[in-house]
Image: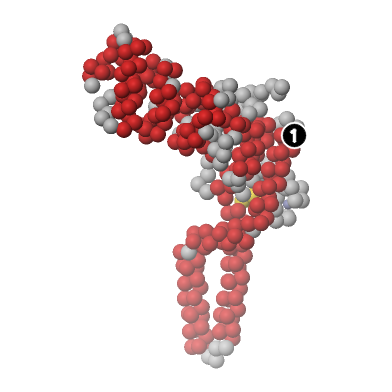
Amino acid sequence: MNIKRAVQFRKHIKLSHQWQRLRYCRACGSYTVLPEEPCSGCGSQSFVTLQEYAATLNKRLFYTEALVLAAFLGVAALAARDFLELGIALLGAAVVIALYVVLKKHFRTSEEIFRLQKITERHMPSIREGLLKDALSAGEDMKNDRHKEAYEKLREVGSLLTIEHIKNLKIMCLNQLIIRKDMELELETLLPAAYNKEFITYLYEVSKVNKSLIRQSVLDYLLTHRLRIEQLPFGKELMSNAAVASLRMRPYIERFYPVILDYMDSLPKERFLRLCKLVNGATSGPLARLQQACREAAKVRYGFDPDVQAIWQEG
Ligand SMILES: [Zn+2]
């Protein structure tokens, strides 16, 4: 049996666009999202960001355009037959240059975005190949029992490549580590398309330390696979933890109420009180059904508890 390790993940930098994670190797044209690693294509470290690469291409284009413009103006000046025509040609050149500079400045941002789009479209096969090589590098780490390092790499890859295989590898890594509240954890981004015991094992660990990560999509997953999950040794405890997590928001309660009904007896008093307050006064639908069940449970469990009894008196 593997012994789980206690680790602290490196901070995952939030970016406004995921493509900003991409690094381009100027030496061989490979892509990576792992800038600390040498290039998997040529071994060099000469990476630039996609934005820097786009800026270089734009600069090259600017020089080419400027050269063509200068050539035209030179021809116009040489063709002048007297000083008047030369003056007109020079004046025209000044106007054209000024216009060119103004237009360049005005359209700079949209030109950069256009350039980035073009690069990502044209380089898509290389980008995909680069990401898969990064995933292979993480696979090597996993083989060598370096699950923290592997997970950190897969987290970068998974930001751009949201395929089941990457999710599964991330879950495998996480299940080799001790899951703590102070860790930067993910959950919804790992949701598999089908029943997945490895994911449910990880979800159980998360449900013990950070219930705030259990949101609507996770609750829906638990509802879909409830019967199978409850057959697992920790299945009922997981459903009970999820019932507690669902009490954070009214829409969650409305959706998850069949489980809340069945696990009401396992709710801690403070959570039970919250549920009573939330459903108090409901006249129809799941909340009314829960209210009825809460009143009955309150009589049995907290018949002489003034905190609980006060809720119904207020209502
Ligand atoms: Zn390279």
Compared to residue 252, the image places residue 24 above or below, namely below
Instruction: Classify mark 1: residues with Cα within 10 Å, few (<14), some (14-19) or many (20+).
Output: few
From the top left corner, tell me how far across and down residue 214 is, in percent: 48, 31
Which residue sits at x=52%, y=29%? Answer: 227
Residue at horizontal 47%, vertical 33%? 223
Q: How many marks?
A: 1
Q: Give the residue furthest to the left.
A: 314
Q: Is residue 189 above or below residue 283?
A: below
Q: Quadrant of the N terminus?
A: top right
Q: Nearer the viewer, residue 202 or 33?
A: 202
Q: Depth check: give the residue in front, 256 or 134.
A: 256
Work out which quarter of the rendered image holds the C terminus and state it: top left
Residue 271 visible in the shown view: yes
Instruction: Answer with left or right where residue 260 lies relative to residue 155.
Output: left
Residue 176 drawn at (x, y percent): 66, 27
Which residue is found at the position 73% from the left and 55% from the top? 28
Q: Quadrant of residue 246?
A: top left
Q: Quadrant of residue 72?
A: bottom right
Horizontal and vertical percent for residue 113?
A: 52, 59
Can residue 209 be seen in this snapshot?
A: no
In the image, residue 115 sits, relative to residue 85, either above or below, namely above
Q: Secondary structure at mark 1?
A: helix
- Whether 47 is drawn above or below 237: the answer is below
Seen at 54% across and 38% down, the residue is: 191
Residue at mark 1: 143
Q: Is residue 88 left or right of residue 67?
A: left
* Among the 4 quarters of the image, the one containing residue 233: top right
